[in-house]
Image (cartoon, grey):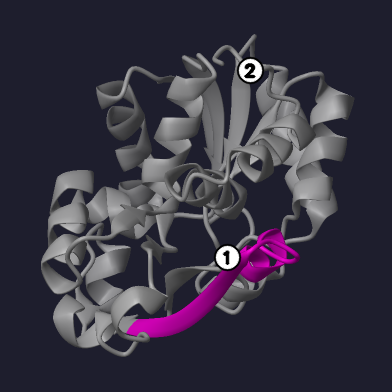
């Protein structure tokens, strides 16, 4: 039985349950801790967790009970940068594997040769606009994007969690109509969207749809060596393996 230390934001009402649902029935235990953060700084495009990482990660079980740390914030990863986040996590709890939705989505896209995406987020302009250069750095072009922040007056993570799946479907259909892409990506662990929703919408649109929590679950299983379980997620999402 392998152990995952899951870090969610103090304001996120969705991410913990969504990630645990992805891991349900698998040979994995998920231990959760939460971090507060400077909300004003994050709205301006940064991310400062409170308390510091070492204090935070030592609220998780000790020793060999944890094999992997998963930081469940997509925009927080991009605000910090992959290298900074990974360095801070490793410094706080060395010798483990580490992931986040942003890191995982890149790993998933690279594994399946996804080079052109459409992007849906709930973020304000600064955070939303940071995604295009982030993905470009990793060889993925954001060909079309849309934020629901202003149209739906999304202020809090609870607001994001209440966005109905039908509205997400409508926005994804509009993005898909803008031109051909290899996949669509729904960013934010606070969106209430399940793997079954992604699979159904992907079949409707004829294009794989990826999301933050599901991508992180795929990458966590990959890092833990749970290959068959990892491949079940990608198969459900309609991704065709291009590797052995």
Identify the mark at residue 241; answer none if there is no mark: 2
Q: Position of residue 20 (x, y in %)?
A: 64, 70
Relative image position of residue 137 (x, y in whole percent) = 25, 25
Up-down: is 99 above or below 51? Answer: above
Where is residue 141? Give x, y as percent. 41, 18
Of helix, strand and loop, which one carries label 1? loop
Q: Quadrant of residue 75?
A: bottom left
Tell me the distance, in whole angstroms, between the alpha carbons under discs 1 and 2: 28 Å
Q: In this view, does 211 lie above or below 108?
A: below
Does the magenta segment cover residue 21? yes
- Mark 2 surroundings: few (<14), some (14-19) or many (≥20) residues within 10 A: few
Mark yes or no: residue 30 visible. Answer: yes
Please name the residue that numbered disc 1 is placed on: 190
Instruction: Please report the residue visible at 25 percent of the width from the left and 86 percent of the height from the top.
Output: 58
Q: Quadrant of residue 238?
A: top right
Q: In the image, what residue occupies the spot 32% across and 65% down?
A: 43
Circle 1 residues within 10 Å: few <14, some 14–19, many ≥20: many
| Front residue (pair 71, 228) | 228
* In front of the other: 80 or 92: 92
Q: Give the range drawn in magenta.
A: 18-35
Per the image, label 2 sits on a secondary structure element best described as: loop
Residue drawn where x is 29% and y is 34% of the image:
134
132 relative to 228 in the view: left or right: left
N-terminal of the pair, mark 1 or mark 2, is 1
Q: Nearer the viewer, mark 1 or mark 2?
A: 2
Residue 187 visible in image: no
Task: Tell me which corner region of the image, top left, top right, bottom left or bottom right, holds residue 178.
Answer: top right
**Residue 244: in magenta span:** no
Q: In this view, does 218 lie to the left or right of 21?
A: left
């Amino acid at each position: 039985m392998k152990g995952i230390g899951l870090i969610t934001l103090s304001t996120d009402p969705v991410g913990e349950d969504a990630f645990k649902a992805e891991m349900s029935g698998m040979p994995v235990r998920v231990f959760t801790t939460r971090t507060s953060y400077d909300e004003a700084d994050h709205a301006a495009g940064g991310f400062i967790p409170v308390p510091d990482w070492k204090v935070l990660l030592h609220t998780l079980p000790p020793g060999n009970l944890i094999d992997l740390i998963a930081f469940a914030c997509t925009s927080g990863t991009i605000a910090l940068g992959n290298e900074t986040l990974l360095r801070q996590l490793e410094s706080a709890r060395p010798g483990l594997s580490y992931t986040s939705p942003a890191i995982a989505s890149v790993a998933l896209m690279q594994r399946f040769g996804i080079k052109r995406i459409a992007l849906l987020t709930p973020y304000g302009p600064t955070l939303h606009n940071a995604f295009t250069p982030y993905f470009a750095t990793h060889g993925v072009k954001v060909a079309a994007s849309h934020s629901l922040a202003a149209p739906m007056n999304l202020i809090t993570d609870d607001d994001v969690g209440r966005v109905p799946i039908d509205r997400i479907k409508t926005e994804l259909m509009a993005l898909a109509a803008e031109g051909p892409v290899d996949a669509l990506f729904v960013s934010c662990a606070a969106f209430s969207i399940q793997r079954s929703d992604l699979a159904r919408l992907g079949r409707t649109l004829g294009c794989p749809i990826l999301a933050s929590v599901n991508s992180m679950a795929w990458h966590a299983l990959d890092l833990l060596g749970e290959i068959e379980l990892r491949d079940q997620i990608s198969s459900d999402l309609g991704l065709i393996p291009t590797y052995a």
